[in-house]
Image (tube, rainbow, N blue to C red):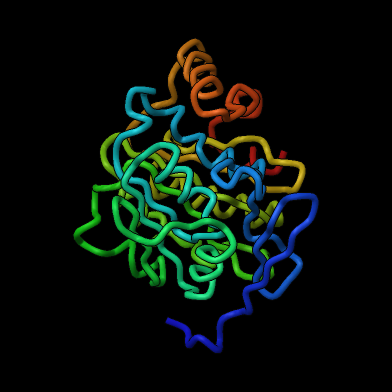
Amino acid sequence: MPKTNDLPEVTVSEYAGVRSLHLNSIWVQGSMRVSKPQKLELDYVQRMMAPLLWQAPERWREGRCVQLGLGAAALTKFCHQVLGRPTTAVELHPGVVMCCRQFFHLPDPGAGLEIVIEDAGTWVLRPEVQGQVDLLHIDLYDHDAAAPVLDDLAFYQACRGLLSAEGALAVNLFGRQSSFARSCGLLAEAFGANQVWRIAATKEGNTVVVATRESPLPDKEELQRRATTMEATLGLPAKRWLRGLKAWAQPSEASE
């Protein structure tokens, strides 16, 4: 684990009622609307909940959730407080955890919420968590937001090992197209090409990629039904995501 003085400074900005977390740069690591602290404010963070479309709605409030990378704690709060699911957040930077508690309404650990200060690459190898995660979020960028800090085959294979049989993950990929194609190729190698899907990029350039351990993509009618249910019950614009959803099949498709 890096020494504390090797980690970037954590800063907070606020504009038009939205508070954002930064790591010694202009890049936003996460945001929260101050008047609605449990709402998922950023478009790409909302899309990180897309794996629920691969799971039956009656299971949306069941099973363990894990975030690799705390950000501004938006997904952690949503899974723990809105969905009421046991939730673990793994964050390397203790300053990020302290900032989220002070400025982003992150509750103290306990009552189904676990905060682990550890390198995500080490935590995913823990024997006691293998096969125990139903919803996994991966958002691991450094302060420059150039490429994921953990992005190799061994890491994605370890992430697959965390998932239960019906488990699914979402990973935020942001950066050059070559970097995106490489990351998707590694995910396809770890999970199987037929178990990886991408959602259209946001206007900011974030692309959320979903991978499942075993679950196939539901048919079009079922996807529409689940998306409609998600909008009505969780307030997430899931029907919009379906318009840009496609399977990851051939690496050449990533450059389209």
Q: Classify residue 65 as left or right of residue 171.
A: left
Which image quadrant: the N terminus?
bottom left
**Residue at the front extreme?**
35
Q: With 176 as the anchor, is 60 left or right in this view?
A: left
Query: Is residue 251 shown to the viewer in this render?
Result: no
Q: Residue at x 65, y 45 (%)?
A: 35
95 or 181, nearer to the observer: 95
User: Where does the image place residue 11, in percent across and percent down from the top left?
Assistant: 67, 72
Tell me the residue at 47%/19% (across/down): 226
State which quarter of the image contains the C terminus. top right
Between residue 42 and residue 135, name the one nearer to us: 42
Is 215 left or right of 188, judged from the image as shown?
left
Which residue sits at x=76%, y=67%? Answer: 26
Which residue lies at the image location 20% right of the left edge and 61% below the top edge?
A: 127
* Residue most extreme to the left: 128
Q: Position of residue 60 (x, y in %)?
A: 38, 30
Q: Position of residue 10 (x, y in %)?
A: 62, 74
3 over 191 or under it: above or below: below
Is 234 located above or below residue 64 in the figure?
above
The location of residue 8, given as percent across then percent down, is: 61, 79
In front of the other: 32 or 211 = 32
Judging depth in this view, the residue of 58 and 193 nearest the camera is 58
